[in-house]
Amino acid sequence: MTDTSPHIPVLIEPILKLCAPIKGVWLDGTFGAGGYSRRLLEAGADQVIGVDRDPLAHEMAAPWIGEYNGRLRLVQGTFSDLDEHAGEKLDGVVLDLGVSSMQLDLAERGFSFLRDGPLDMRMSSEGQSAADLVNEAEEEMIADILYHYGDERASRRIARAIVAERGKGPITTTAHLAAIVSSCLPRPKPGQSHPATRSFQALRIAVNTEFEQLVEGLMAAERALKPGGLLAVVTFHSLEDRIVKRFFQERSGRDGGGNRYAPGGPSEAARFDILTRKAVGADDDELEMNPRSRSALLRIGRRTEAPAGSVDPATIGVPGLKSGATGGRRKGR
């Protein structure tokens, strides 16, 4: 599959405005269909390094990458290693988290409950699939994934239903899983999201180790950015935004306090200055043009001269699934 139609990058206008002037070398850690990379180059970046673990992203870029005369360099890999992929100090990093539109639109990728296809959800097409997880994981693990990664309050009920259904035969399609989840929840009212939304989100996060990748990527950006370099992160659900918010709070020398996963820790030397005191959302014009921006939030930080360090995932709100992480469950799960 190839596609030369323009991709609409979410919240790109506030990114370009808040990060102006765009110059030097930028890294687009979630290249996808190339929308952010194109706009960064058009706005004045000397070079953009596009990183994506999905082979399809590289396939789709092949017909048009030559338009930029070597100013766009693609790397197949994950943004958790972006400092290694860059190979040099960067003026900016942009991360658009979550599943891309092109992945959702392809039924065979298995990301969408609205399009029946094989239950896959792998961004790199390698490793454990969602079908492997729902057919092989213990009921307790499935419940923990749904609760901690999807904030699904009916996680126990859904996990029991999944285990009961797989006893009759493997669960191999998105429609099959969506029907199981829907059978455990009330019929949605007009305007509410599909009942399977949270469960599909949680399984996708687990399959692609997205929270681990996010923490590693934020630390890699801290290592890779020059003093004065900019880190722009676009999130699409509250768990991601919470992690990014806590990261910037901790790395700016401000302790944002505890959370339900871990207490707050001592403040450290500021590695970032926060440019967005509150997360930036889409304005009315963008919402009308691009419905995908409805849940998007943008946070931006500017790198200081302080040396890079490490981050404890628990202190920035990353949910865990192992010992101690499953305590305090809500009644009714």
Image: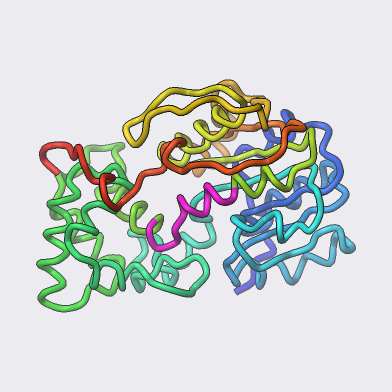
Residue 188 image offset from top left, x and y in percent: 21, 42
Residue at the extreme bottom of the image, as rendered = 169
Viewed as shown, does residue 331 lie left or right of 305? left
Q: Residue at x 63, y 41 (%)?
A: 309
Res. 4 image quadrant: bottom right
Residue 238 image offset from top left, x and y in percent: 41, 36
Q: In this orientation, does residue 191 appear? A: yes
Res. 158 image quadrant: bottom left
Q: Eyeballing the image, is 244 above or below 279?
A: below
Viewed as shown, does residue 184 lie left or right of 178? left
Q: In this orientation, does residue 291 appear? A: no
The magenta segment is 206-217
Quick one: 196 or 188, which is closer to the camera?
A: 196
User: What secondary structure prevails in the magenta region?
Assistant: helix
Quick one: 99 or 290, which is closer to the camera?
A: 99
Q: Eyeballing the image, is 305 above or below 133?
A: above
Residue 329 image offset from top left, x and y in percent: 18, 40
Q: Eyeballing the image, is 306 above or below 39?
A: above
Quick one: 309 or 295, which is closer to the camera?
A: 309
For residue 213: magenta? Answer: yes
